[in-house]
Amino acid sequence: MLACLCLFGLRVDVWLVYVTVFGDTKLPDKNGNFSMASSLKTNKSEKRPSGNFSMPRTECDILSCPNLKAFTFSELKNATRNFRPDSLIGEGGFGYVYKGWIDEHTLEAARPGVGMVIAVKKLKPEGFQGHKEWLSEVNYLGQLHHPNLVKLIGFCLDGENRLLVYEYMPKGSLENHLFRRGARPLPWALRIKVAIGAARGLSFLHEAEQQVIYRDFKASNILLDSEFNAKLSDFGLAKAGPTGDRTHVSTQVMGTRGYAAPEYLATGRLTAKCDVYSFGVVLLELLSGRRAVDKTRVGAEQNLVDWAKPYLGDRRKLFRIMDIKLEGQYPQKGAYMVAILALQCISEAKVRPSMSEVLSALEQLPPPRDPTSPSNSDPQVIYSPHVKSPMRPNSPHLKSHLRNNYDSPVNMSPRSPLPPHMKSPILKSPRGRCFSSQLVTSV
Ligand SMILES: Nc1ncnc2c1ncn2[C@@H]1O[C@H](COP(=O)(O)OP(=O)(O)O)[C@@H](O)[C@H]1O
Ligand SMILES: [Mg+2]
């Protein structure tokens, strides 16, 4: 029964939801001409969201966002060829995602192949269970704009239908690239590029004047554009961070098994450090090519954190957890630095680095060598017990850890029309994300 209580779907007050919102933010271009380029360097001039984001807003306020188009259901039916199964590009815990086309100027439905490509998420037909998450996405993505957040173009609220319209991300999700059977292995340099992009997105949220906690950071929520720039999508569980003297926000425990921080699972107390833990789990997925939770494996190997942790701080053993699909094509030093960073992220909350520290550590990784250069014919760095860290971490605890150590495409449900290799074993509940029976005061 308690497990049921944590399902958003059983809440009856969804129509009266008040959610925390953002104020003075940089907003998406109404024509849908979003900036797609996101270099690996931080854009210092990037606008941070500012204003009083903790002011409650009504559903009516949220839906009247001038930067978003309110689509009718029939418009989106036309844009996706009536949600044809062959337009289906993904599925998460909340909805099916279809590819569609709209005119880039008028934003009206266009013929397939003409105009701007969009992704349309249609909430699963389970009454109004996903309404709160749907509204949360409209609220957050309608007002936050950053090269590493997916752009929301509009929404549809039509009878019982709830849909969201996003820019289309041609390379799909990180999950597909890492775990889909038959996917071309993601080279090391692209793994690092994706990690940096995702870290930028999270840092942006955490450093907002009113902090935003993403709460569902995982490989399937990291989408990739044509150049493998990472963008966070799926703001259904995002939450305004604590304000004033508060250290945390108390929430119903929501998230995805294997990615959620243990202290959050135990207490329902949400902090930005919970996102840092999830980021650490994704770093482990990038290193190992294994899922956060993999029920097809035996014993301790089912949980990536439990399995990988003993190898992360030992440079000589690290190769044992590295993704065999990399075929050894990664710099040992860089891999070790990422492993140490992951270890810090999954450690106790109080010693976890902040996302900006994680980002700066990733940005300081040595650039991948050119394998064609004669001096780099062997891309592997030979183990040296006295190698110095080129990571230059800002965080004192990262520094001390390094000093000590260097001196020595898609979650699917059973009825999904997508092929089985795209199904995720992670999501267990029908809603996909709620996995704890703990119910803490919802804020
Ligand atoms: N804008 C997009 N472009 C391309 N694929 C997308 C897009 N949005 C979602 N997808 C695909 O659909 C999947 C589920 O989307 P998501 O927003 O995470 O849904 P849910 O809220 O149900 O978890 C993603 O993992 C991805 O594979
Ligand atoms: Mg998702």
Image (cartoon, rainbow, N blue to C red):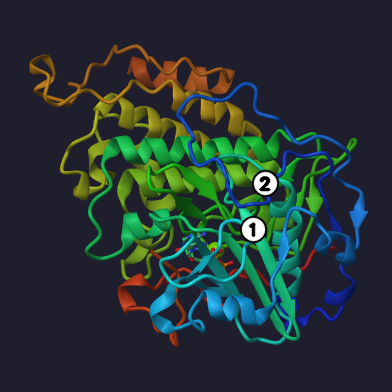
Which of the numbered marks, if any, corresponds to residue 153?
1
Question: Mark 1 belongs to which amino acid?
Answer: Ile
Mark earlier in primary sequence (1, 2): 2
Residue 380 image offset from top left, x and y in percent: 17, 26
Question: Mark 2 belongs to which amino acid?
Answer: Pro
Q: Answer with the quadrant where ligand 2 appears in the image.
A: bottom right
Residue 58 in the figure: left or right of residue 235: right
The correct choice, above or below, for 214 with respect to 362 in the image is below
Residue 69 in the figure: left or right of residue 15: left
Assign a secondary structure to mark 1: strand
Which of the numbered marks, if any, corresponds to residue 28?
2
Visible in this render: residue 432? no
Measuring 60% from the left and 41% from the top, which residue is drawn there?
202
Marks 1 & 2, CB-CB < 8 Å contact? yes
Visible in this render: residue 136? yes
Q: What is the crowding at mark 2: few (fewer than 14 residues within 10 Å), some, or many (at least 20)? A: many
The span from disc 1 to disc 2 (Cα, nearest Å) is 8 Å
**Residue 333 picture quarter:** top left
Query: Image quadrant for the C terminus?
Result: bottom right
Measuring 90% from the left and 72% from the top, which residue is drawn there?
16
**Residue 167 picture quarter:** bottom right
Q: Nearer the viewer, residue 123 or 28?
A: 28
**Residue 71 picture quarter:** bottom right
Measuring 40% from the left and 58% from the top, which residue is drawn there?
175
Measuring 66% from the left and 46% from the top, which residue is drawn there?
29
Residue 13 image offset from top left, x and y in percent: 87, 77
Residue 221 image offset from top left, x and y in percent: 52, 57
Residue 208 image offset from top left, x and y in percent: 74, 35
Query: Image quadrant for the N terminus?
Result: bottom right
Residue 16 in the figure: left or right of residue 159: right
Residue 376 in the figure: left or right of residue 423: left
Assign a secondary structure to mark 2: loop
